[in-house]
Amino acid sequence: MAKTELNEAFIALRSQGLSFRKINKRIGVSKTTLVKWDKKFHEEIAQLRDEEFDQVLSRIRAAKQDRILRLVEQVDRIEDELAGRDLSDLTTLQLVRFHTVYMERLSAEIDPTQVDVRITEPAARYAAIIEECAALVAPVAQLGAEVVQKLSESGPITP
């Protein structure tokens, strides 16, 4: 390899986090020289590392957006199906639980403070739905708390 090719190989390998020992084995340059190159090419290594990190973040963001969109589609399908069904055979609790599972999955994927611009509309829509669900569940939780309070006030239950 020519010197510039060795330098480029070093920068690429170092930006990937490889140790001088591993780089030495790969490109056959002494550790002393590699240490000198590390100081000389510090900025290029950092820049390449940042670019690689940005690429990884972009892939993570894209994968997260795909998961969110799939969950949104599932929630939409569930809501469409539920809207067209006679729900008399299901209890309210069963319906709320079924819907809540998908809403929890969706809300776990969406951080309203860091929503990607491309998904702002669905995120806002489902954030509102999550708030509505919370409002529906809150009275049930309050009632449960009241029941627990009354039971605890009445003393231990004996068979």
Image (cartoon, helix red, strand yellow):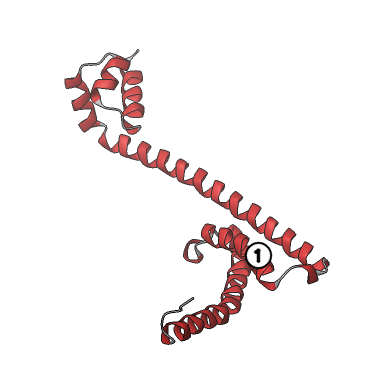
Say left or right for 23 vs 157.
left
| Position of the N terminus by quadrant | top left
Dot 1: what SS? helix
Q: Is residue 103 above or below residue 64?
A: below
Image coords of residue 65 (percent x, y): 58, 52
- Circle 1 sits on which residue? 99
Say left or right for 122 vs 34.
right
| Res 84 quadrant in image | bottom right
Identify the residue shown where x is 65% and y is 71%: 93
Q: Is residue 70 above or below residue 124?
A: above
Task: Please identify the residue farthest to the front as the structure is shown.
Answer: 159
Three-letter amino acid code of the residue under disc 1: His
Task: Please identify the residue farthest to the left as the structure is shown.
Answer: 32
Image coords of residue 66 (percent x, y): 60, 49
Image coords of residue 75 (percent x, y): 68, 60
Identify the residue shown where x is 32% and y is 19%: 6
| Res 14 quadrant in image | top left
Q: Is residue 32 above or below residue 137?
A: above
| Res 50 quadrant in image | top left
Mark 1 is surrounded, within 10 Å at the Cα level, by few (under 14), some (14 to 19) or many (20 or more) other residues, namely: some
